[in-house]
Image (cartoon, rainbow, N blue to C red):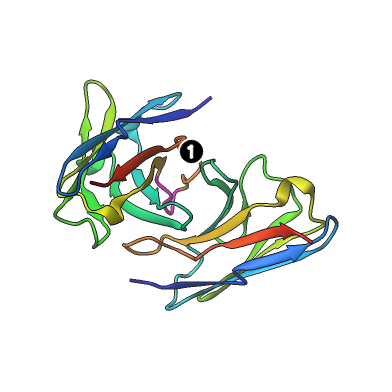
C-alpha cells in the first residue's frame, strides 16, 4: 500500500495566519490526491481534488499544489471556521490511503 | 440536494455480524462508484472498500484488514448499498461512512453522516 505521511500532526495558528500542511507519498501518485476538512462529529468535507482543483463552494483561501510525491495544502488568512482536522487522501491505487491528519488549533 | 444516509449501526459482540445500509436522495446509487470509510474513536480516516457502478458490474475492492470478512453489495431495485460485516473484531469499532467514490472522473464530494459500530463483549 502507498503510505501517506502528513505533517505536522498539530498546528497552532491565529486568525489571519497563512498555514501550510504537507503530505508525502511513499511512491508516485501523479496528481491523484485530495484534501479533506473534518470537524468533530461531522463527516469529512472535500476541499481540493486532483491535487490543486478547488471543490465548488470552497473559499478561495484554500489552495493545493504538488504532484508525484510531495503535496501541500495552504490556507491563506486563516478564519475561525477553519479550525479543524485536515486529511490528505491518495486514490491512485488500491487501497486508498489517508495521511494521519493535521489538527489546526487556535493559538 | 444530494444526501447519503447510513443505517444499521449497533453494539455487537466479537465474532458477530452486522449489515450497514446506505441510501441516497438526489442521486441514483446504481450510477455511482461508492466507497465505505471508517474512523475509529479518536483516530484518523480509513478507506474500507469500493463498489463500482452498474456499468462496471458492481465489482468491489477492499482494504486488506477486512478482505474475506466484509462484503459490499447492492440492492438494485431499492437502489441501496450494503456493507455486510462478519467475524467482527474489537478493532472494527468505528464510525462508518458511505461516500461517493473519488476517482479520476471526480466524486469524493458527498458523504453520509456516519453510523457507529461498536464491537465489544
Where does the image place residue A46, in percent across and percent down from the top left?
Answer: 56, 47
Judge the density around disc 1: few (<14), some (14-19), many (≥20) Cα neighbours within 10 Å: many
Please tell me which residue is depicted at 47% across the width and 58% down the height of the picture: B44
Q: Quadrant of residue B46?
A: bottom left
Residue at left offset 82%, top offset 56%: A77
Residue A87 in sight from this viewpoint = yes
Q: Where does the image place residue B88, in percent across and percent down from the top left?
A: 20, 49
Furthest toward the front, the residue is B121
Magenta stretch encompasses residue B103: yes
- Observer-nearest residue: A97 or B119? B119
Query: Which corner quadrant of the image does residue B65 belong to?
Result: bottom left
Is A50 one of the magenta-colored residues? no
The majority secondary structure of the magenta stretch comes to: loop
Image location (x, y in percent) of residue A35 = 56, 57
Judge from the rendering whether residue B28 lies leftward or rightward of residue B66; answer left or right.
right
> Residue tagged by mark 1?
B110
Magenta span: B101-105
Give the residue displayed 28% in from the left and 39% down from the top.
Answer: B53
**Who is closer to the viewer here, B73 or B9?**
B9
Q: Is residue B71 above or below residue A78?
A: above
Amino acid at each position: 500500500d502507498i503510505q501517506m505521511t502528513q505533517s505536522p500532526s498539530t498546528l497552532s495558528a491565529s486568525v489571519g495566519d497563512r498555514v501550510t500542511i504537507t503530505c508525502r507519498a511513499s511512491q508516485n501518485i501523479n496528481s491523484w490526491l485530495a484534501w479533506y476538512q473534518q470537524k468533530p462529529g461531522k463527516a469529512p468535507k472535500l476541499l481540493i481534488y486532483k491535487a490543486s482543483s478547488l471543490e465548488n463552494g470552497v473559499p478561495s483561501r484554500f489552495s493545493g499544489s504538488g504532484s508525484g510525491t510531495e503535496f501541500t495544502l495552504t490556507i491563506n488568512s486563516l478564519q475561525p471556521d477553519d479550525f479543524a482536522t485536515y486529511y490528505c487522501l491518495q486514490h491512485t491505487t488500491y487501497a486508498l490511503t489517508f495521511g494521519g491528519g493535521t489538527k489546526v488549533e487556535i493559538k | 440536494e444530494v444526501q447519503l444516509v447510513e443505517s444499521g449501526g449497533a453494539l455487537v459482540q466479537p465474532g458477530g455480524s452486522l449489515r450497514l445500509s446506505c441510501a441516497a436522495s438526489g442521486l441514483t446509487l446504481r450510477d455511482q462508484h461508492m466507497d465505505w470509510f471508517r474512523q475509529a474513536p479518536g483516530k484518523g480516516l480509513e478507506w474500507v472498500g469500493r463498489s463500482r457502478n452498474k456499468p462496471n458490474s458492481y465489482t468491489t475492492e477492499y482494504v486488506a484488514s477486512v478482505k474475506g470478512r466484509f462484503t459490499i453489495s447492492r440492492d438494485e431495485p431499492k437502489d441501496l448499498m450494503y456493507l455486510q460485516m462478519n467475524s467482527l473484531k474489537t478493532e472494527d469499532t468505528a464510525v462508518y461512512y458511505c461516500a461517493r467514490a473519488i476517482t479520476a472522473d471526480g466524486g469524493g464530494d458527498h458523504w453520509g453522516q456516519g453510523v457507529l459500530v461498536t464491537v465489544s463483549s
